[in-house]
Amino acid sequence: MHGTEFRLLGPVGIWQGEQGLGPTAAQQRSVLAMLLLEPGRVVSVDRLVMAVWGEDPPGSARNAVQVQISKLRRILTAPADTELSTSAQGYCLTVDQERVDLHRFRELVREARTVGDGPAGELLHAALQLWRGPALADVAGGWLPETVGAGLEEERRAVVEECAAIDLRSGRHQEAAAVLSPLVAEHPLRERSVGLLMEALSRSGRRADALALFRSTRQRYVDELGIEPGDDLQRLHRKVLDAQPAGADRAGLALAGADPAPAAADQTPAPAAPTPTAVAPTAVGAPAPAAPATAAPPSSVPQDTSPEPPSESPPAAEVAVPQQLPADVVHFTGRERELAGLDALLRPAPGAGPGSGSGTGSRTGGRVPTAAVISVIAGSGGLGKTTLAVHWA
């Protein structure tokens, strides 16, 4: 901006272009900051005293304020259209609010909230560029920076989050990550900022960084607060996990004890010669029976008596865990009898299935069993046991 600029969003001062006009004294900066917070309004001497010394001022505080006002007047002779006047109630600094960075920031934010996402994002980015550091960065004393300064910082953080949310809606994911990263580094337990940054990183193709951010945030919550992150952040974490390609960072989701992916030889179509020989159900956790006359539930497929142990143990019942099966072959032919036998295990009824003469009806009464049933497909290696199981599943 051309002409004189009054700054509060960072070090407090008066600037003419690139030249700083002051003030250099700490007490003058506090008085100037208090006057610039309410330009065109009378600020009482008591409030100026509070701005400089807080709640424990010296006895000479009022006289000291008058001295600082006189020094400020000498600095303010250079800027045009600027006047520091005295009244019975206090002092008033008359200045165009467009020249005060804080009021220009607020005006840009107000304008952004009246337009659509496209121009709103540009206006909010422009507003945030006015900040040159923490508000009232070089103001001495505790009261002004700890009250007014802290409020201005919270105002900035809210605008950063608002700007990032608009960037995400507009597809500007990298811009959102850029404005959020410093904020999250400064306030790592601010959930909304962390969530927005996780989403920005994930949408930018940086899922690993988004997940790492959640892990570090969760660890901070547990270590420093003794609690877990809020529901919104945990839901977002699950959303980022679910958005990943199959097999990426999903090892922790697999069932314990799940078999590894079968060898390539078992994923090819089975040859037309020898067939998988048997399907036999047993109670959960029991070994495969040696003959159908045992206490195992009956099957419509003859029992194999081969001594070779089964090489695959896929569950007959549907398991609600995603991505646990290898892909089915494109063309599967034959094995109608074995497929029918497997189907019969899920729908037992008196006389169901070809070749069933083992009294199924007397065991189940025609009802679907409520206990889980495990079936084993046995046979020599390379005959297509896995291919059959995957196709049937």
Image: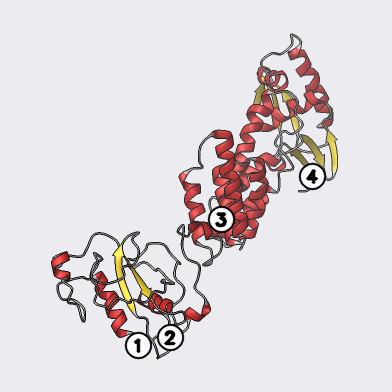
Q: Secondary structure at mark 2?
A: loop
| Amino acid identity at mark 3 | Glu
Q: Secondary structure at mark 3?
A: helix
| Amino acid identity at mark 1 | Gly
Identify residue for label 3.
Answer: 199
* Residue situated furthest bottom in the rendering: 272
| Amino acid identity at mark 2 | Ala
Which mark's residue is nearer the viewer, 1 or 3?
1
Q: CA distance from mark 4 to mark 3?
A: 41 Å
321 with respect to 299 (left or right): right
Characterize the local packing of mark 4: few (<14), some (14-19) or many (20 or more) Cα atoms within 10 angstroms: few
Identify residue for label 4.
Answer: 3
The quarter of the picture where residue 152 lies is: top right
Q: CA distance from mark 4 to mark 1?
A: 87 Å
* Residue situated furthest top in the rendering: 59
| Mark toward the start of the polypeptide (4 vs 2) | 4
